[in-house]
Amino acid sequence: MKKLFVTTLLALLISGGQAFAQKFAWVDTDYIMAQIPEYKQAQDELNKLSVQWQKEIEAKYAEIDKLYKNFQQDQLLLTEDLRKKREAEIVEKEKDAKDLQKQRFGVDGDLFKKRQELVKPIQDKVFNAVKELAELKSYACVFDKSSDLTMLYTNAKYDMSEEVLEKMGYKKTGN
């Protein structure tokens, strides 16, 4: 009787461990995003804005450079008051250029805000699709292959990237 009890308990523990095994999957968000036309359009728009704003800033620095060179050439001919006035003008223009650079490309700058406006809704859709699929398939955890997380080995059968795209309404493209 004791032997039967131990055997039954052992069988329950072994099968119970399998019943409570957690399921994992992974996605490649870089791949998913690359398959979404709206994301490509958003990236193109951000790149155009970035180039435009960079040219605007470079033009300001070119103007400052020109003012500085002219100042150096004229420095000996200028009165003390004029020299100070032109130095102050150059310093003010440098400050304006740096402020513009910070406004456009700073931590909370225009580029960041535009990226939030254009890309965040797409990222949210991807996140929601991943979440819905994970809940539907009872995954305990879904990893992102594109992140800094090092994945030494991935089995393609656990890749949900295509399913996420399908859930979002995009056609399967295959790998």
Image (cartoon, rainbow, N blue to C red):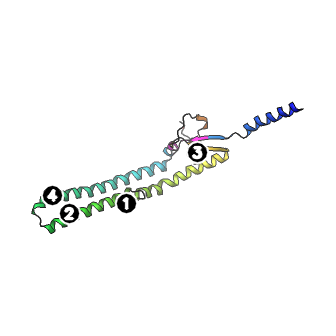
Q: How far across and how far down the image is residue 164, in percent? A: 58, 45
Instruction: State how far apart marks 4 and 1 are (Cα).
Output: 30 Å
Proximity of marks 4 and 3: CB atoms separated by less than 8 Å: no
Q: Amino acid at mark 2?
A: Glu
Q: Which label's residue is closer to the chain start, 3 or 1? A: 1
Q: Nearer the viewer, mark 4 or mark 1?
A: 4
Q: Which label's residue is closer to the chain start, 4 or 3? A: 4
Q: Amino acid at mark 1?
A: Gln
Q: Nearer the viewer, mark 3 or mark 1?
A: 1
- Neighbour tally class for label 2: few under 14, some 14-19, many 20 plus, Cα within 10 Å: some
- Neighbour tally class for label 4: few under 14, some 14-19, many 20 plus, Cα within 10 Å: few
Q: How far across and how far down the image is residue 37, in percent? A: 48, 48
Q: Which label's residue is closer to the chain start, 3 or 2? A: 2
Question: Which circle marks residue 133 in the picture?
Answer: none
Instruction: State how far apart marks 4 and 3 are (Cα).
Output: 62 Å
Which residue is disc 1 drawn over?
103
Q: Which label's residue is closer to the chain start, 4 or 1? A: 4
Left or right placement of residue 22 versus residue 58 in this view: right
Q: How far across and how far down the image is residue 109, in percent? A: 40, 58
